[in-house]
């Protein structure tokens, strides 16, 4: 597999990872959003902190940034995860600096990165205030937080699904992720709000129901503090994932074409409406100069 250069190329990767249609579209929508940010903000250096994953694939949310020429650093809070993430990036053919760091007291100097961001970890961390303070400290320009959407119509169905299966709710504290709550916390951390919005609005609710895991899946075995960012995750062995990646032949079949077509419809939805309907609202803030 050649290193991906566009969001469309990464759709082939999503197919190889076999994460399901919902996650594949989520990756596409996120990649297109990040591409648009690169064009607008022109960051030279970006930090994903903490760099988690979904559906058992850690540390690959920033691939599109590296593919578009951004100098990417990933901060993961566990050494075992750092080793796995390095192997995944090497197999994909893109470069990033991957470090084991605390997301509340990292070793990065102040004002190091143009963009500091994370995806769907805000609702899991014990102290959102400490996380945002650290993100603001190491950023010289922008801070971006994307979360789940507590107002998404799929949330009640998702909660019901957990109750019916007698499984604990493992998707974080939803009271933390209302857009106005994140905005207020971002301001308290010293950042100025640039914009809010949302992304990932496929034609299905945010339910994430898997009737059964893949036959080769194994239970998540990471220790704290990483396990708290991805509780209850089913993951397949690392080598199996790498084998799928290396055997991948890029193709653009029905589903990648469908994602592109549907995303064109999503882009015409007003940004403020997406805050309450999309799967993932976001808050983009700017760090004042001299702070």
Image (cartoon, rainbow, N blue to C red):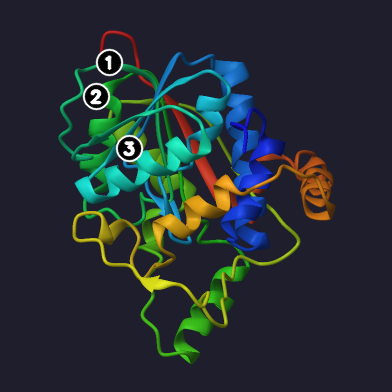
Tell me if label 3 and label 1 are in contact, CB under 8 Å.
no
- Marks 3 and 1 sit apart, C-alpha to C-alpha, by 14 Å
Circle 2 residue: 137
Circle 3 residue: 49
Residue 225, x across and y down, in percent: 20, 55
Q: In which quarter of the image is residue 222?
A: bottom left
Residue 69, x across and y down, in percent: 53, 18
Instruction: Residue at 33% x, 40% y: name it.
Output: 185
Residue 279 appears in the picture as rendered: no
Q: Which of 53 and 30 is in front in this view?
A: 53
Instruction: Identify the element where label 3 is drawn.
Output: loop
Instruction: Residue at 67% x, 52% y: name it.
Output: 25
Number of marks: 3
- Marks 2 and 3 sit apart, C-alpha to C-alpha, by 12 Å
Residue 98, x across and y down, in percent: 31, 33
Tell me if label 2 and label 1 are in contact, CB under 8 Å.
yes
**What residue occupies the far top of the structure in this picture?**
290
Q: Is residue 131 left or right of residue 194?
A: left
Quadrant for the C terminus in the image: top left
Q: Nearer the viewer, residue 223 or 138?
A: 223
Q: Mark 2, mark 3: which one is toward the viewer? A: 3
Circle 1 residue: 111
Q: Which of 2 and 13 is in front in this view?
A: 2
Q: Earlier in the sequence, mark 3 or mark 1?
A: 3
Q: Earlier in the sequence, mark 2 or mark 1?
A: 1
Instruction: Residue at 46% x, 42% y: name it.
Output: 60
In this picture, is 160 found above or below 86?
A: below
């Amino acid at each position: 597999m050649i290193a991906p250069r566009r969001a469309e190329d990464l759709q082939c990767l999503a197919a190889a990872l076999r994460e399901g249609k919902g996650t594949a579209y989520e990756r596409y929508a996120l990649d297109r959003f990040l591409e648009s940010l690169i064009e607008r903000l022109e960051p030279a250096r970006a930090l994903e902190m903490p760099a988690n994953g979904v559906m058992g694939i850690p540390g690959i949310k920033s691939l599109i940034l590296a593919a578009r020429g951004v100098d990417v650093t990933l901060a993961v809070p566990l050494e075992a995860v750092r080793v796995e993430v390095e192997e995944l990036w090497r197999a994909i053919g893109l470069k990033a600096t991957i470090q084991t760091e605390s997301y509340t007291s990292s070793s990065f100097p102040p004002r190091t990165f143009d963009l500091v961001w994370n995806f769907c970890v805000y609702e899991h961390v014990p102290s959102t205030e400490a996380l945002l303070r650290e993100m603001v400290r190491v950023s010289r320009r922008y801070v971006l937080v994307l979360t789940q959407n507590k107002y998404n119509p799929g949330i009640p169905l998702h909660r019901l699904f957990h109750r019916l299966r007698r499984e604990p709710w493992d998707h974080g504290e939803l009271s933390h992720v209302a857009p106005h709550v994140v905005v207020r916390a971002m301001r308290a951390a010293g950042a100025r709000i640039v914009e809010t919005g949302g992304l990932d609005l496929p034609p299905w609710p945010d339910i994430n129901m898997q009737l059964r895991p893949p036959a080769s899946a194994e239970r998540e075995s990471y220790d704290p503090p990483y396990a708290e960012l991805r509780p209850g995750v089913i993951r397949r062995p690392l080598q199996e994932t790498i084998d799928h990646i290396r055997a991948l032949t890029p193709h653009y079949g029905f589903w990648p074409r469908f994602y592109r077509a549907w995303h064109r419809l999503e882009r015409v939805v007003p940004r403020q409406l997406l805050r309450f309907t999309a799967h993932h609202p976001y808050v983009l803030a700017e760090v004042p100069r001299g702070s």
